[in-house]
């Protein structure tokens, strides 16, 4: 009984993932400290190719060795420590849900808010915890007080759920939703900024910008776009579903007004976790997506009125942030970019093979699109899985037709070597 009593005391007083007794510290602190000493002083670019260091990271995941998962752009697996946190607190919740959830684990959201704010480089009073980027961004899209005739500019390459949200506002409220289109890859920021600016009219109110285009991984010049938008008196919404936890940045640096992300992608938080950031002075004017007793409040918590929710997932998010901070955001970004270029650089000159993504670090990081002349994306996707057990995803959207390949920190070089061999053999048939 004593260990159990001690555990419950820790849950009640320290909220698990947000204390010195976190699962991460229990499982990894000692071994990671030794690894950190070995690479101390090395620049992130050098650490990116240190296979001994990343081997330790790889061992922290529980991925199936019989399946090479290269569709981390959809959803990423969580490391073992995150899974165990969710399982531990889920079991605790089920011992007495209304007590342990509402009176114990619910106290963990404020420490989580602080932890996410530290990672995002902002005030905790600007962070709301929710379930994914769609929920976060729909909160803003439906919460803005736009009038008939007000214009919003997005692109045909934005995420479908965001496009449909704007189209619904267009149907219901008679706003004007305008979409420009790009042919990626583009290695010219000014070309992208000019295309948005050319679409602006005196009635334009909002720019909707996808930080990393989910189809092919193009990194959009968000800072330059927000600077341009401010000159025209516009607000900017950023879809950061694929950038948060991958790129090394702080949200306020982007200059945007609203930012939504999924934490279950590159942060490797539990599946079904997300985050909304709204600049402090903008919170009051945004209506919450779900009902709240004070919808015009300036309190960011009005966006968390979801009813019963998964408190164990919130503990898991905390452990994912611990995991992220132990690696370091810049170090992680450099590693995943290294992995992307490792395989893409080897296949780019194979006959019939075409890349749909830049290899330059300013314009891409993890996601890369590839195609083989004479094959549909679905055919290539099937060939990779059926013949080599490599899981990817086929993409056919607007002017984009390719297979999307996305490694993560747990991806091993021999798996990417197998991918290169698979593409070469498939292209040669």
Image (spheres, rainbow, N blue to C red):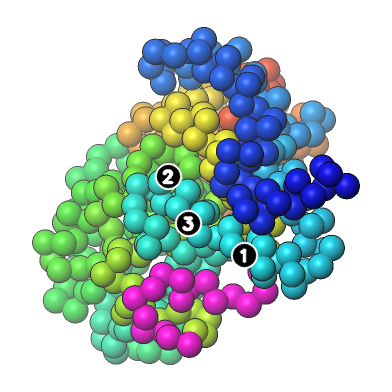
Camera-side mark, 3 or 1 = 1
Q: Is mark 1 on a helix, strand or loop?
A: helix
Give the CA distance from mark 2 to mark 1: 21 Å
Q: Does the stretch in magenta take in 298?
A: yes
- As drawn, the residue found furthest toward the left would be 231
Report how far apart the C-alphas of labels 3 and 1 lie in the structure: 12 Å
Question: Residue placed at 16% from the left, 73% from the top?
Answer: 201
Q: Earlier in the sequence, mark 2 or mark 1?
A: 1
**Camera-side residue of 355 and 342:** 342
Quarter occupied by residue 330: top left
Q: Earlier in the sequence, mark 2 or mark 3?
A: 3
Q: Main secondary structure of the magenta part?
A: loop
- Residue 119 disc label: 2
- The reply to whether callout 3 and callout 1 are in contact (CB within 8 Å) is no
Nearer the observer, disc 2 or disc 1? Answer: 1
Q: Where is residue 246 in the image (x, y as percent from the top left)?
A: 47, 39
Label 3 Cα crowd, 10 Å radius (few <14 / some 14-19 / many 20+)? many
User: Where, by quadrant of the figure, is residue 98 drawn?
Assistant: bottom right
Mark carried by residue 106: 1
CA distance separating discs 2 and 3: 10 Å
The segment highlighted magenta reads 293-309
Residue 229 is situated, as x and y percent measured from the top left of the image, at: 19, 61
Question: With 94 as the anchor, is 15 left or right in this view?
Answer: left
- Please provide percent x and percent y for residue 282: 29, 71
């Amino acid at each position: 009984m004593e260990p159990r009593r001690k555990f419950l005391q820790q849950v009640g007083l320290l909220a698990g993932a947000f204390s010195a007794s976190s699962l991460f510290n229990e499982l990894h602190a000692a071994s990671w400290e030794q690894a950190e000493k070995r690479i101390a002083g090395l620049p992130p670019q050098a650490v990116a190719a240190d296979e001994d260091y990343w081997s330790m990271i790889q061992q922290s995941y529980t991925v199936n060795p019989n399946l090479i998962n290269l569709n981390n752009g959809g959803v990423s697996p969580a490391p073992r420590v995150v899974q165990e946190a969710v399982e531990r607190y889920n079991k605790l919740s089920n011992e007495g849900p209304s007590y342990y959830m509402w009176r114990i684990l619910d106290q963990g959201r404020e420490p989580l808010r602080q932890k996410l704010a530290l990672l995002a480089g902002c005030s905790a009073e600007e962070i709301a915890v929710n379930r994914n980027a769609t929920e976060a961004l729909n909160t803003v899209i439906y919460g803005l007080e736009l009038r008939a005739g007000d214009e919003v500019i997005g692109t045909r390459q934005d995420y479908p759920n965001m496009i449909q949200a704007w189209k619904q506002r267009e149907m219901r409220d008679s706003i004007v939703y305008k979409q420009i289109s790009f042919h990626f890859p583009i290695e010219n920021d000014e070309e992208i900024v000019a295309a948005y600016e050319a679409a602006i009219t005196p009635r334009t109110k909002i720019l909707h910008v996808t930080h990393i285009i989910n189809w092919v991984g193009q990194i959009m010049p968000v800072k330059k776009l927000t600077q341009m938008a401010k000159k025209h008196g516009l607000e900017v919404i950023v879809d950061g579903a694929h950038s948060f936890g991958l790129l090394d940045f702080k949200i306020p640096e982007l200059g945007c007004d609203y930012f939504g992300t999924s934490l279950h992608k590159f942060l490797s938080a539990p599946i079904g976790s997300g985050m909304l950031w709204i600049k402090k002075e903008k919170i009051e004017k945004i209506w919450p997506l779900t009902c709240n007793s004070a919808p015009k409040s300036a309190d960011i918590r009005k966006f968390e009125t979801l009813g019963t929710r998964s408190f164990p997932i919130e503990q898991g998010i905390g452990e994912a942030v611990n995991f992220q901070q132990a690696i370091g955001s810049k170090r992680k970004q450099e590693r995943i970019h290294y992995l992307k270029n490792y395989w893409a650089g080897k296949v780019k000159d194979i006959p019939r093979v075409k890349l749909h993504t830049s290899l330059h670090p300013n314009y891409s990081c993890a996601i890369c699109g590839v195609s083989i002349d004479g094959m549909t994306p679905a055919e290539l996707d099937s060939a990779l899985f059926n013949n080599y057990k490599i899981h990817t995803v086929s993409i056919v959207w607007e002017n984009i037709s390719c297979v999307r390949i996305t490694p993560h920190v747990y991806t091993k070089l021999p798996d990417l070597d197998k991918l290169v061999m698979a593409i070469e053999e498939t292209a040669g048939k």
